[in-house]
Amino acid sequence: MSYSDQPQKLTIAMPKGRIFEESVHFLQQAGLQVTSDLKESRKLIIPVENAHLEFILAKPTDVPTYVEYGVADVGVVGKDVLLEEERDVYELLNLQIGYCRMTVAGLPDWKPTEAPRVATKYPRIASRYFREQGQQVEVIKLNGSVELAPLIGLADRIVDIVSTGQTLRENGLVELEHICEITTRLIANRASYRMKSEAVDDIANKFLQAIPKE
Ligand code: PRP
């Protein structure tokens, strides 16, 4: 076998956390031999036997970083993370899973103030949105439990993703403005897309077949 006949090995970055379960189910739908290892193990690099594939399990916000630097050829990631991280990667497919929305939320009796503060895990998305609205706000970056901020007087509003709406409801907050819809995407490293086109196409096709039909 010549060098060029060697099957190209592909590394896929998978996000741990919110969209992990749904993403694993998606891989299984795509016909990839994903064992229970991926769900249960604490291992961060998981090879797939006989498939010239390996998974790396990453913090969701780091998936585009691994893909931009080429240590992962492709990655599964939420559009929220892509919009926030602004990494130089190819967006190959909208996987139509992991549906949620990016919204501005706050207390129902929220009143505009002169120098409003907005708490969020997504400072770039929030800054861009309010700039486009022509509103001056101070954006405060938090790393989680953002819903706390209006309750304890840290911020007037929050920018966050809403899925079932349960977190907002249980904390007495309401959606005030809709920013955009979010779904999970398949992304690729630009060099891998050219140099490993066969393997990337193959995986993209498998993913394509698994996209839920309307
Ligand atoms: C996300 C998001 C909201 C919640 C929305 O947080 O930031 O807090 O989920 O989901 P819901 O509308 O179904 O209630 P996550 O669970 O990722 O945790 P975090 O707050 O620690 O970031």
Image (cartoon, grey):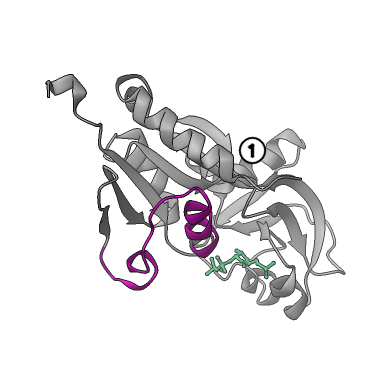
Residue for point 65% across, 70% down: 147
**Residue 204 is a magenta residue:** no
Q: Quadrant of residue 3?
A: top left
Judge: label 1 CB < 8 Å from ligand 1: no
Residue for point 42% across, 61% down: 16
Q: Position of residue 42 (x, y in %)?
A: 28, 70
Q: Position of residue 211 (x, y in %)?
A: 62, 44
Does residue 194 sit above or below 137 in this rendering?
above
In the picture, measured across the screen, residue 89 lies left or right of residue 104, that is left
In the picture, measured across the screen, residue 43 lies left or right of residue 160, that is left
Which residue in the protein does label 1 denote? 128
Q: Secondary structure at mark 1?
A: helix
Q: Quadrant of residue 5?
A: top left
Number of numbered labels in the structure image: 1
**Which residue is nearer to you in this view: 6 or 165?**
6
Residue that lies at the very extreme toward the front in this rendered image: 1
Q: Position of residue 67 (x, y in %)?
A: 36, 38
Quarter occupied by the C terminus? top right
Near mark 1 (Cα within 10 A), the count class, few <14, some 14-19 or many ≥20, is: few
- What residue span does the magenta drawing correspond to? 21-43
Quarter occupied by the N terminus? top left
Residue for point 52% across, 32% down: 91
Q: Position of residue 17 (x, y in %)?
A: 47, 64
Whether residue 109 is visible: yes
**Which residue is nearer to you in this view: 88 or 158?**
88
Whether residue 18 is visible: no
The amino acid pointed to by label 1 is Arg
**Residue 39 is a magenta residue:** yes
